[in-house]
Amino acid sequence: MIRRDLDDVDFIRANLMGPSSIIMLEELSKNLPLQKGMRVLDLGCGTGLTSIYLAQKFGITVFAVDLWISATENYRRFREFGLESQIIPIHADACHLPFAEQYFDAVISVDAYQYFGANEQYLDDHLAPLVKEGGKLAIAMPGVKMEFDGVIPVELQPFLSLSEVDNQWHTCDWWRKLWQQSPNVYVESVREMRCFSKAWYEWLQCNNDYARAN
């Protein structure tokens, strides 16, 4: 078994799927009261980098859920870190999560929520019920500084379709207003991340077809 650590830059870059999820999670988790023994859902974990970070840094049990990366592939990665007993890999759709209500101390989602949560129903129907009373939901994702209102800037037209913009790319204010409609959560903070430029820079250094195209 290979014993890896997250100081391996080549390993991280080989497994990124967008702006650095590790850099984003480092900032996001600074204000989370995560403690050893907690159960945490890592929703849209991708290749599991964020799950590995959470398990290593906080000693929590992580349920690593993703639709596009198989549970078997992620399990192999978790074994390389010796974390197979601490991280549970699950292949599931974010709209069909196989968990009991009030099961998690926290839900964390990094660079994923925009793909399934940009509607009035998702938070209350699929996510909030899974979190214990007083638990935390922490979300980090790419966004925009102003709504496009049906017009994509020329510079972005090669990369984004109008449907992608309408369904995924929004401002902090747009997300705040959406989440504040929920009777089941209290919105503590919605803001631009300080690591924005650094996270995207790391993605652009990857030997990845999508990164090179960006």
Image: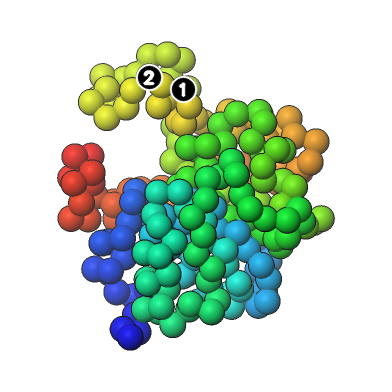
Which amino acid is tagged 2?
Leu
Q: In the rendered image, is residue 157 in sight?
A: yes
Quadrant in the rendering for residue 20: bottom left
Q: Residues within 10 Å of mark 1 (few under 14, many from 20)?
A: some
Horizontal side of 194 relative to 120 (left or right) equals left
Which element is circle 2 on?
helix
Residue on which the image places disc 1 = 166
Depicted 72 relative to depicted 19: above or below: below
Point out residue 118 in the picture as x, y percentages from the top left corner: 56, 31
Point out residue 192 in the picture as x, y percentages from the top left corner: 51, 43
Pick whichever, 65 or 123, lies toward us. Answer: 65
The residue under the point 19% across, 39% down is: 213
The residue under the point 47% across, 37% down is: 115
Pick whichever, 115 or 177, lies toward us. Answer: 115
Image quarter in which the N terminus is found: bottom left
Point out residue 110 in the picture as x, y percentages from the top left corner: 49, 51
Pick whichever, 148 or 52, lies toward us. Answer: 52
Q: How far apart are marks 2 and 1 (CA)?
A: 6 Å
Which element is circle 1 on?
helix
Depicted 182 relative to depicted 131: above or below: above
Which amino acid is tagged 1?
Asp
Horizontal side of 208 relative to 88 (left or right) equals left
Quadrant in the rendering for residue 61: bottom right
Residue on which the image places disc 2 = 162
The residue under the point 57% across, 63% down is: 63
Depicted 11 relative to depicted 90: above or below: below
Colour logic: rainbow
Depicted 37 relative to depicted 140: above or below: below
Q: How crowded is mark 2: few (under 14 residues within 10 Å), some or many (20 or more)?
A: some
* Mark 2–mark 1 CB contact (< 8 Å): yes
Image quarter in which the C terminus is found: top left
